[in-house]
Image (cartoon, grey):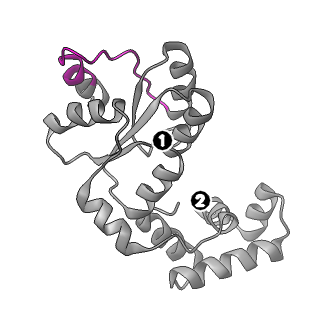
Amino acid sequence: MMRGALALLLGLEEDIDVVAQVERGDGIVPAARETRPDVALLDIELPGLSGLDAAARLREEVPGCRVLILTTFGRPGYLRRAMEAGAAGFLVKDGPVEELAVAVRRVLDGESVIDPALAAAALGAGPNPLTGRECEVLTAATDGGTVADIAAELHLSPNTVRNYLSSAIGKTGSRNRMEAVRAARRQGWL
């Protein structure tokens, strides 16, 4: 419903044509390869592939497409990850709808558009302290699997998984891996 409403609102703008809508993150790159949009408006949490991962793939596979992230999840870690993935803009959904079309135009013109309050929070938050492998292990731990399950999934030894979990727990100031997962998600690191 939200995707359709946004497409309808943007389609009412004289200078904006909505060329595709996709339900799942793993449909973004194929649709963009087919339609060659100037700007892709993406959410972060999507089934199949996150908007952040889709943004990185768009940068590689459809380099002429600029990405604007529009999300409910205004977290400093998500903003950093979006910019690292090549997004040109990052807005939170609670902003005025009129600003969305302006943001699309600005991104199309080569500007970066970032929610000001989130930009200030991101500057104060500092970088993600977790390594890529620690993030990977925490992500694998989200379903509550055992250390052996995580080790098998990631092709690591159980001791290596324990070491990464222990390090991530320490860096997030948590008492256990599920608290570490929640803390890392709250910061937007996962």
Image-based side of 47 in relation to 111, left or right: right
Image-based side of 10 in relation to 130, left or right: left
Q: Residue at the spot x=32%, y=56% of the render?
A: 74
Q: Which mark is residue 143?
A: 2
By secondary structure, the bulk of the magenta-drawn segment is best described as loop
Check disc 1 and give the amino acid type. Answer: Gly
Dot 1 alpha-carbon crowd within 10 angstroms: few under 14, some 14 to 19, many 20 or more: many
Front-lying residue, 120 or 23 = 120
Q: Mark 2: which secondary structure?
A: loop
Q: Which mark is residue 6?
A: none
Q: Which residue is mark 1?
A: 51
Image: magenta residue range: 7-24
Of pointers 2 and 1, the one earlier in the residue sequence: 1
Check disc 2 and give the amino acid type. Answer: Asp
Dot 2 alpha-carbon crowd within 10 angstroms: few under 14, some 14 to 19, many 20 or more: few
Front-lying residue, 143 or 27 = 27
Residue 71: image location, x then y, percent: 33, 46
